[in-house]
Image (tube, rainbow, N blue to C red):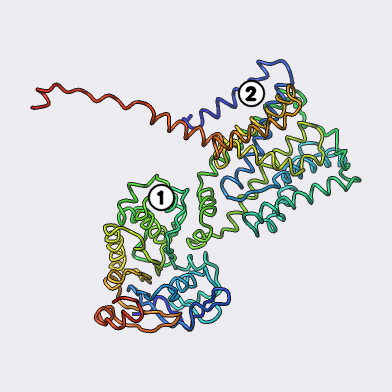
C-alpha cells in the first residue's frame, strides 16, 4: 500500500470501527451521514476544485436521484436495487440535458444557472404534490435488503456508505491524475490555450459535469435509503450552499478536503445543536475563522503550516573540523 | 518551395474595428517568415485568426492548400497549426510533464521528425530539470520555453510564434533564439512575430511589415537591415 493511500485507509477503517466501539446507533448514524456528505462533496469538488466551475445548484444531482429512487420504490413498487439503478440512469440523463444549458456559461453565469436549474427541480418537488408529495415529501422508502446484507441495521448501512466512499476516493484519485483530469485543470487555467493545443473544452467540462452528477447521484441514493424519506428541503439553495461550504472549509481541489469539510459540517450540525440552540451561528463563526486563517481551506492550510514548521526548525549545526586537518 | 501557409485577402475585426484589412501573404515551407510592425499593426490579430481564436469576416487561410476558414481552434491545431501565444499563457497549476503529456499529438503526416517529450528535453534541457515543477512557479524564460514545447509536441506543420523574446533576459533570449534556429534547421515552417528587430532579422528568411492591418513592405531581411528610412517609418527604429 503506497504512502498516499495509507492515511485514507486508516481514516476509513477507523470510521468502520465506530460500531464496534459505540453501542449507540446515534454515533453510527452520524458517521454514515459524514460518509454520504463526503461522497457528495467529492462530486462537487470535480466541478469547483478541478474544472473551476462554481456551482450553487449541486443539490439537484442527489435530489433527482433520491426522488427517483423514492418514487420508483414506493409508488412504483419496484424493488429498491432496481429502483436505484433506474434512479442513477435517470439522474445522469437529466444531468446531461442540464449540461447543455449550464455549460454555455462560466463564472457568475454558471453560479446563477446551476442555482436556477436546481430551483426548477426543487419547485417541481415542492408544487407537484400529486407525484412528489409536496412539502411532505415521500416517506417509507425501503432500503435494499438481502439476507447477507441486512441494511436495516445501522452498522451494515454504515459499511455500505464507507464502501461507496472508498470507491469514490479511488476513482477520483485516479481521475485527477489521468490525462482527462489534467486536461480539466488545464481548461480551468487557460481555456483558450486548451483549444489551441487541440482540445474541445466543452467536452472536457461535460465529462466533469457528468462525473460530478454521478457521485452526487450516488450520495442521493444513500441519502434516500439512510433517511428512508425525501423532501424538497434536500434541494433548497441552503443544501447546495452547505456542500459548497464543506469544500471551502476542507480545501477545494484536494482529495482529502471534501472528506474533512463534510466531517466538520456534519459534526457541527449534529453535535453543536445538542448544546447550543443557535448552532448555525457557531457554524458561521467557524467558517469565518477558517477563511481568515486558512483561506484555501483546512487541507492546504495545514500543508502550508507544515512547510513553515519545517523552515522554523534550527539548521543543523555546522560540523567542526579540527584546524590542523582543515589546513591540510 | 511550396507554401506552408497562405493568407489571401484576410479581414479580421475586433468588434466593429477592422484590425487586419485584406492581408495577402504566404510562408514558405521550412522557412522562417517574420511579421513585423508597430504596436497595433495587426500582428497578433493575424496569428489569432490563423489559429482560429478570432473569426475572419473575409478572405482565406490555407495550410498546405487546405482551407482553415470557419474551423474551431482545436480542429486547426489537429490539422497542424501550433501557436505559442504572446505572454506565454502556460497552465500555472500543471507541471511541465503534465503540459507536454496533454498537448502531445502524433503527427498526422508521416514526418521524418516527431516532437515528443524526449525531443523537448533535448531542445530545452532546463525543462528536463523542471519536469515535476508547477509551471506557475517557474521563471519567465522557463515558461516561454514550456510554451514553445507545448506547441511543438502537438507536432505542427507550421509554428506560430508570438513575441517569444518579450520580457526575457539577454541570456534567455539567446537560448530561445538558438532553439528557434534549431527548429528551422530541422525544416519546420515558422511564422514569427517579434519586436526585437535584430533577433527577427537574424532568424528570418523573409520579412513582412504590417501597418494598420495592411502589408506595406515585404522582402529579404538584409535589405530591410540596410534601409534605415524603412525601419524608421514602419518600425520606429532610428
Q: Is residue B111 left or right of residue A166?
A: left
Tell me where residue A139 sits by quadrant. top right
Q: Which chain contains the residue that carries disc 1?
A: B
Count neighbours of disc 1 (C-alpha within 10 A) and say few if under 14, some if 14 to 19, many if 20 or more.
Answer: many
Residue at the spot of label 2: A16
Q: Please, what secondary structure does the residue beneath circle 1 have?
A: helix
Q: Nearer the viewer, residue B86 or B98?
A: B86
Identified at 38% across, 72% down, the residue is B191
Q: Nearer the viewer, residue A110 or B127?
A: A110
- Residue A245 is at least partly visible in this image: yes
Of the residues tagged 1 and 2, which is closer to the observer? 1
Q: Is residue B229 left or right of residue A146?
A: left
Number of marks:
2
What label sits on residue B96 in the rendered view?
Answer: 1
Q: Is residue A171 left or right of residue B193?
A: right
Q: Is residue B72 left or right of residue A66?
A: left
Q: Nearer the viewer, residue A13 or B114?
A: A13
Which quarter of the rendered picture does the C terminus of chain A lie within? top left
Q: Please, what secondary structure does the residue beneath circle 2 have?
A: helix
What label sits on residue B188 in the rendered view?
Answer: none
Amino acid at each position: 500500500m503506497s504512502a498516499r493511500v495509507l492515511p485514507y485507509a486508516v481514516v476509513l477503517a477507523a470510521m468502520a470501527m465506530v460500531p464496534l466501539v459505540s453501542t449507540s446507533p446515534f454515533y453510527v448514524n452520524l458517521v454514515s451521514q459524514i460518509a454520504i456528505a463526503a461522497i457528495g462533496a467529492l462530486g462537487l469538488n470535480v466541478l469547483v476544485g478541478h474544472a473551476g466551475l462554481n456551482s450553487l445548484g449541486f443539490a439537484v444531482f442527489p435530489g433527482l436521484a433520491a426522488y427517483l429512487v423514492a418514487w420508483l420504490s414506493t409508488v412504483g413498487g419496484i424493488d429498491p436495487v432496481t429502483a436505484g439503478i433506474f434512479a442513477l440512469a435517470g439522474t445522469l440523463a437529466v444531468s446531461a440535458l442540464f449540461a447543455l444549458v449550464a455549460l454555455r456559461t462560466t463564472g457568475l453565469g454558471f453560479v446563477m444557472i446551476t442555482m436556477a436549474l436546481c430551483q426548477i427541480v426543487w419547485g417541481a418537488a415542492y408544487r407537484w404534490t400529486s407525484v412528489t408529495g409536496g412539502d411532505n415529501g415521500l416517506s417509507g422508502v425501503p432500503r435494499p435488503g438481502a439476507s447477507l446484507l441486512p441494511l436495516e441495521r445501522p452498522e451494515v448501512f454504515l459499511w455500505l456508505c464507507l464502501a461507496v466512499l472508498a470507491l469514490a476516493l479511488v476513482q477520483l484519485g485516479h481521475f485527477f491524475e489521468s490525462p482527462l483530469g489534467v486536461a480539466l485543470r488545464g481548461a480551468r487555467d487557460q481555456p483558450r490555450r486548451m483549444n489551441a493545443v487541440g482540445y474541445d473544452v466543452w467536452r472536457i467540462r461535460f465529462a466533469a459535469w457528468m462525473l460530478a452528477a454521478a457521485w452526487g447521484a450516488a450520495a442521493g441514493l444513500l441519502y434516500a435509503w439512510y433517511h428512508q424519506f425525501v423532501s424538497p428541503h434536500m434541494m433548497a439553495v441552503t443544501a447546495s450552499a452547505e456542500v459548497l461550504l464543506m469544500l471551502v472549509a476542507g480545501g477545494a481541489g484536494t482529495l482529502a478536503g471534501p472528506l474533512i469539510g463534510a466531517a466538520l459540517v456534519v459534526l457541527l450540525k449534529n453535535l453543536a445543536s445538542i448544546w447550543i440552540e443557535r448552532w448555525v451561528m457557531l457554524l458561521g463563526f467557524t467558517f469565518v475563522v477558517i477563511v481568515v486563517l486558512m483561506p484555501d481551506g483546512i487541507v492546504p492550510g495545514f500543508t502550508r503550516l507544515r512547510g513553515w514548521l519545517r523552515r522554523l526548525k534550527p539548521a543543523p549545526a555546522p560540523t567542526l573540523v579540527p584546524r590542523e586537518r582543515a589546513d591540510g | 518551395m511550396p507554401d506552408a501557409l497562405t493568407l489571401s485577402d484576410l479581414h479580421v475585426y475586433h468588434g466593429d474595428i477592422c484590425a487586419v484589412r485584406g492581408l495577402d501573404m504566404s510562408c514558405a515551407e521550412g522557412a522562417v517568415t517574420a511579421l513585423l510592425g508597430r504596436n497595433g499593426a495587426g500582428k497578433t490579430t493575424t496569428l489569432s485568426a490563423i489559429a482560429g481564436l478570432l473569426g475572419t469576416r473575409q478572405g482565406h487561410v490555407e495550410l498546405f492548400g487546405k482551407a482553415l476558414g470557419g474551423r474551431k481552434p482545436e480542429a486547426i491545431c489537429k490539422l497542424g497549426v501550433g501557436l505559442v501565444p504572446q505572454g506565454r499563457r502556460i497552465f500555472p497549476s500543471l507541471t511541465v510533464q503534465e503540459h507536454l503529456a496533454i498537448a502531445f499529438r502524433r503527427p498526422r503526416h508521416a514526418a521524418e521528425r516527431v516532437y515528443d517529450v524526449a525531443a523537448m528535453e533535448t531542445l530545452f534541457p532546463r525543462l528536463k530539470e523542471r519536469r515535476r515543477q508547477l509551471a506557475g512557479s517557474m521563471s519567465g524564460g522557463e515558461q516561454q520555453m514550456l510554451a514553445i514545447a507545448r506547441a511543438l509536441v502537438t507536432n505542427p506543420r507550421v509554428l506560430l510564434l508570438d513575441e517569444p523574446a518579450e520580457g526575457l533576459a539577454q541570456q534567455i533570449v539567446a537560448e530561445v533564439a538558438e532553439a528557434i534556429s534549431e527548429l528551422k534547421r530541422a525544416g519546420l515552417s515558422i511564422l514569427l512575430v517579434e519586436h526585437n528587430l535584430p533577433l527577427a532579422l537574424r532568424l528570418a528568411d523573409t520579412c513582412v511589415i504590417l501597418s494598420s492591418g495592411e502589408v506595406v513592405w515585404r522582402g529579404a531581411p538584409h535589405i530591410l537591415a540596410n534601409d534605415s528610412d524603412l525601419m524608421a517609418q514602419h518600425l520606429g527604429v532610428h
